[in-house]
């Protein structure tokens, strides 16, 4: 298959492009600069109209591009986070419409944050949207992706475990110093997934035509933040700080990002992945952390 990937230089894009290429697909990376090799095409995700031929030859598109979320959200940062996702998704769906032989599938990023803070409730893809900046962003992002005249899959990704960055990126140096501690009450569920399962899940949805709409891309065993902290300190053979980081301190340092991403609870199930036969490589956090680290 010829597969076009946006955000290919990112944490998830890099791992996905490598795996798709190894699987024998031809991958075309859309980049925001001049192309450096024949596998790249330039695109401008802020453009009003797609460049002619942007998606020519593609059977599938995987759209991962978006400005980073893991930082303090000023009004300008929020605008950048929203525009880089909504406008680029709109541009791609228009490009699909204008392609003579259009791609059959658009797989587009979204987040488990769609559900807002759901506390102790077990959630799956039928759970309605929650409240908050990220929940509203995910809804708008998914709505744009669903306008494509093709099969549309939205990846409601949880916390991806990778040695190379993502959520573990800022945590590892702190934990290696022996300063790892639960966040807030530590009772909030973190829906983790190892990066090789994230890649495997995307390969699975690309080849499984019956799967469409939102898909929770999370492992089958979400754990509470305090258990995550304990497992990570054990994997690194470091002590766990006995005192949690107070909500107030997190809020002062990171604002709404702390409240919506770090302190929110998502006891999410990967119902559609399981129902469609995806076999997880990592079902337990200790094994996943050992593999990732
Ligand atoms: N990692 C996670 O745990 C996680 C969890 C939930 C959802 N997601 C979502 O999944 C997608 C990929 O995640 P990731 O961790 O791979 O992200 P990432 O490492 O931050 O990479 C995102 C890529 O998007 C492109 N990009 C950056 N700023 C942009 C902007 N202002 N406008 C357009 N494109 C921009 C860049 O690629 P180029 O320079 O090549 O264009 C960048 O490498 C994101 O949309 C993210 O929100 C990730």
Image (cartoon, rainbow, N blue to C red):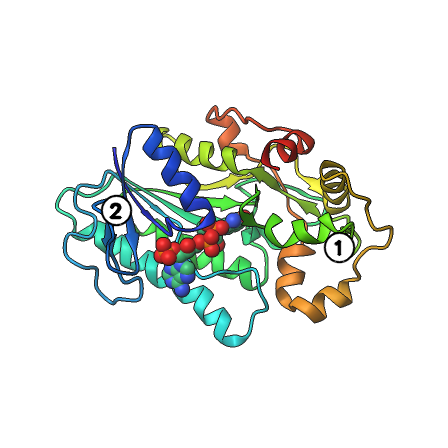
User: Picture quarter containing residue 204?
Assistant: top left
The image quadrant where one finds the C terminus is top right
Which element type, helix, strand or loop, lies under badge 2? loop
Give the image location of residue 220, x and y in percent.
Answer: 61, 32
User: Picture quarter containing residue 61?
Assistant: top left
Give the image location of residue 229, x and y in percent.
Answer: 74, 45
Give the image location of residue 133, x and y in percent.
Answer: 55, 64
Q: Please state which of the two labelled residues, at mark 2 or mark 1, is closer to the viewer.
A: 1
The foreground one among 113 and 180 is 180
Q: Which residue occupies the extreme right position in the image?
A: 242
Q: Relative to 36, is 197 on the left or the right?
A: right
The foreground one among 25 and 239 is 239
Earlier residue among tags 2 and 1: 2
| Residue corresponding to mark 1 | 183
Q: Could one spot residue 111 in this view of the protein?
A: no
- Within 10 Å of disc 1 (Cα), the crowding (few <14, some 14-19, many 20+) is many
Question: In the rendering, which numbered label is found on residue 124?
Answer: none
| Residue corresponding to mark 2 | 149
The foreground one among 201 and 115 is 201
């Amino acid at each position: 298959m010829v597969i076009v990937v946006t955000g290919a230089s990112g944490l998830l894009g890099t791992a996905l492009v490598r795996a798709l290429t190894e699987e024998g697909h031809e991958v075309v990376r859309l980049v925001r600069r001049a192309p450096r090799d024949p596998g790249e095409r330039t695109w401008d995700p802020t453009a009003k109209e797609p460049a002619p031929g942007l998606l020519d030859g593609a059977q599938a598109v995987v759209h991962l591009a978006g400005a980073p979320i893991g930082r303090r959200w000023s009004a300008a940062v929020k605008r950048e986070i929203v525009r880089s996702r909504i406008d680029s998704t709109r541009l791609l769906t228009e490009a699909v419409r204008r392609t003579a032989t259009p791609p059959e599938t658009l797989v587009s990023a979204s987040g488990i944050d769609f559900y807002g803070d759901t506390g102790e409730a077990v959630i799956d893809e039928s759970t309605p949207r929650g409240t908050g900046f990220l929940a509203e962003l995910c809804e708008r992002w998914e709505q744009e992706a669903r306008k494509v005249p093709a099969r549309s899959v939205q990846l409601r990704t949880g916390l991806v475990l990778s040695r190379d960055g993502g959520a573990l990126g800022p945590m590892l140096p702190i934990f290696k110093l022996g300063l790892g501690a639960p966040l807030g009450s530590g009772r909030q569920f973190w829906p983790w997934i190892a990066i090789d399962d994230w890649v495997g899940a995307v390969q699975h949805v690309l080849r499984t035509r019956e799967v469409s709409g939102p898909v929770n891309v999370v492992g089958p065993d979400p754990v509470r933040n305090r258990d995550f902290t304990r497992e990570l300190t054990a994997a690194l053979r470091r002590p766990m700080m006995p005192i949690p980081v107070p909500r107030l301190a997190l809020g002062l340092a990171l604002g709404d990002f702390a409240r919506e991403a770090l302190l929110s609870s998502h006891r999410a199930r990967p119902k559609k992945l399981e129902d469609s036969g995806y076999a997880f490589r990592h079902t337990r956090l200790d094994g996943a952390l050992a593999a990732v680290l």
